């Protein structure tokens, strides 16, 4: 029964960690776009976006990431046989990728604080989708529990990536067209 409680807590903190990872690039996008506004708007928006980002990052995202890691390791300690199956190796690889994504977002946050964030909002919109792709991969691996399912997951992830890119490009064109009217 302890295992199930730990697993439930692990899932809860995965959800809150991803909430932060989904929203932080959004705040970066708003901040980047605020820098192109007239000075009076920029002077109001920038400090507010910095405050929102700081609170999200340090009150929700970082604690959730650490607690997720603790419960995940605890689950592996309680059930070490998971480390002998192929799908878990692939899942752990995606977890490493997720941590690298998290750390890169931290680096971007620090650049935002110093007002040296040089990414375009378009690049940030694409970056925003990395967490989605990792989430899809991890969920499919955890639910299907097969390494062969990985082949289909890769095909699905590539298709998802293509669809996301098409959506981002279409949205950018829509915004540009609206700006012309």
Image (tube, helix red, strand yellow):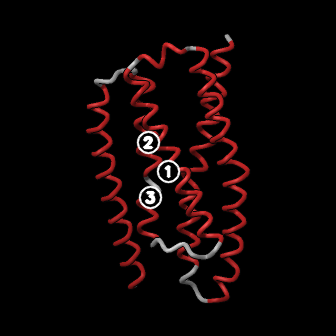
Residue drawn at the location 57% of the way across and 80% of the way down: 35
Label 1 sits on a secondary structure element that is helix
In-image side of 129 versus 48 (left or right) = left
Q: Earlier in the sequence, mark 3 or mark 1?
A: 1
* Distance (Cα) linking label 3 and label 1: 9 Å
Q: Which residue is mark 3?
A: 127
* Distance (Cα) linking label 1 and label 2: 10 Å
| Label number found at residue 101 | 1
Q: Nearer the viewer, residue 134 or 178?
A: 134
Q: Which residue is mark 2?
A: 134
Residue drawn at the location 44% of the way across and 38% of the way down: 94
Q: Position of residue 148 (x, y in %)?
A: 28, 24
* Distance (Cα) linking label 2 and label 3: 12 Å
Q: Earlier in the sequence, mark 2 or mark 3?
A: 3
In-image side of 155 versus 21 (left or right) = left
Which residue, as the protein is rendered here, is positioned at the far top? 1
Label 2 sits on a secondary structure element that is helix
Q: Nearer the viewer, mark 3 or mark 1?
A: 1
Q: Nearer the viewer, residue 84 or 170?
A: 84
Tag 1–tag 2 contact (CB < 8 Å): yes
């Amino acid at each position: 029964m302890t295992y199930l409680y730990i697993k439930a807590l692990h899932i809860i903190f995965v959800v809150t960690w991803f909430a932060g990872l989904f929203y932080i690039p959004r705040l970066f996008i708003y901040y980047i776009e605020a820098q192109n506004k007239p000075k009076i708007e920029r002077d109001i928006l920038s400090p507010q976006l910095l405050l929102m980002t700081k609170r999200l990052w340090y009150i929700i995202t970082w604690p959730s990431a650490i607690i997720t890691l603790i419960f995940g390791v605890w689950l592996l300690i309680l059930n070490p046989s998971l480390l002998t199956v192929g799908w878990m190796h692939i899942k752990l690889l995606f977890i490493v990728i997720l941590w690298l994504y998290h750390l890169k977002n931290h680096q971007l946050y620090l650049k935002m604080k110093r007002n040296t964030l040089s990414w375009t909002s378009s690049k940030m919109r694409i970056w925003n989708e990395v967490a989605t792709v990792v989430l899809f991969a991890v969920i499919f691996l955890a639910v299907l529990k097969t390494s062969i399912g990985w082949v289909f997951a890769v095909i699905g992830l590539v298709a998802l990536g293509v669809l996301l890119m098409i959506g981002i490009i279409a949205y950018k064109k829509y915004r540009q067209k609206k700006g012309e009217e």
